[in-house]
Amino acid sequence: MITINVGHLYPNELNLYGENGNIKALKYALEKYSVQVNVTNINESDPIDFNQYDFLYIGSGRPIFLRKAKERLKIYKEEILNYLNQDKFFLITGNALSIFDFLGLYEVLIPDSRIVADIIGTSSLCNGMIRGFQNTEYLIKNLNNIIFNLDNPNGNDFSPFEGFKYHNLYVTSLIGPLLARNPNLTEYFAKKLREQKKTSNYLNY
């Protein structure tokens, strides 16, 4: 049996708009394929061993908690980059995107006013429509390595192109919860995780 270890970063602080629904949706999708899913809540005082996880997730929160999370995570910069360069998965949704500019992979744009909008779009990651919601004071500035094509100019740098992808790092301002509202996207992650784990198990056999 395949086992996938999921780490949920700071669920007590960063869980606005029911963002833990993303973890529930992914777990459900994986378990349909008889995958053992172990979910660990990584709380504020917990040390992080990135080698333990196949998939990390962090969601939206109040500004004060975003700042606290950033201060905690900055000390792990090299560990996070090493984790990503192993093609392990990290999903960042909503205003949590503002935390990780310290990695030097993308820039954060602060609009003059908060963006609140329903979103419909598409993605090269999966077939079908993508539906989400934005309620954010941050956008991504970069126009490279995008994830979504939106039906409005609320994407990166106020373009219709939204999100940022680097290896298996996926950063987006969209919430919903995103995976709960888009089973087609959830299936993409479930498939990629299973394939990667099978390859890893084979190489380590």
Image (spheres, rainbow, N blue to C red):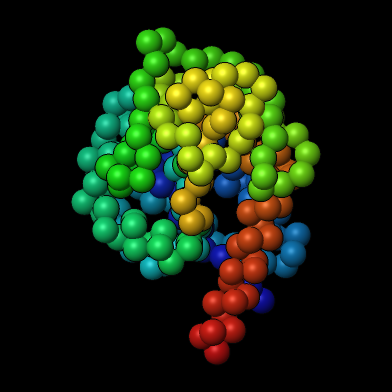
Task: Answer above or below: position of 54 versus 128.
Answer: below
Q: Residue at x 41, y 30 (%)?
A: 141
Residue lying at the far bottom in this picture: please name it: 205
- Closer to us: 109 or 88: 109
- Closer to us: 62 or 172: 172
The image quadrant of residue 95 is top left
Residue lying at the far right in this picture: please name it: 128
**Quadrant of the frame with the N terminus:** bottom right
- x%, y% of residue 169? 47, 51
Q: Residue at x 43, y 66 (%)?
A: 86
- x%, y% of residue 189? 63, 54
- x%, y% of residue 55? 50, 57
- x%, y% of residue 32? 75, 59
Residue lying at the far front in this picture: please name it: 144
Task: Answer above or below: position of 160 versus 84.
Answer: above
Q: Residue at x 59, y 84 (%)?
A: 202
How many labels were placed on the picture? 0
- Closer to us: 49 or 118: 118
Would you say residue 161 is visible in this rendering?
A: yes
Would you say residue 16 is visible in this rendering?
A: no
Q: Residue at x 34, y 63 (%)?
A: 82
In the visual, does 13 lie left or right of 123?
left
**Quadrant of the frame with the C terminus:** bottom right
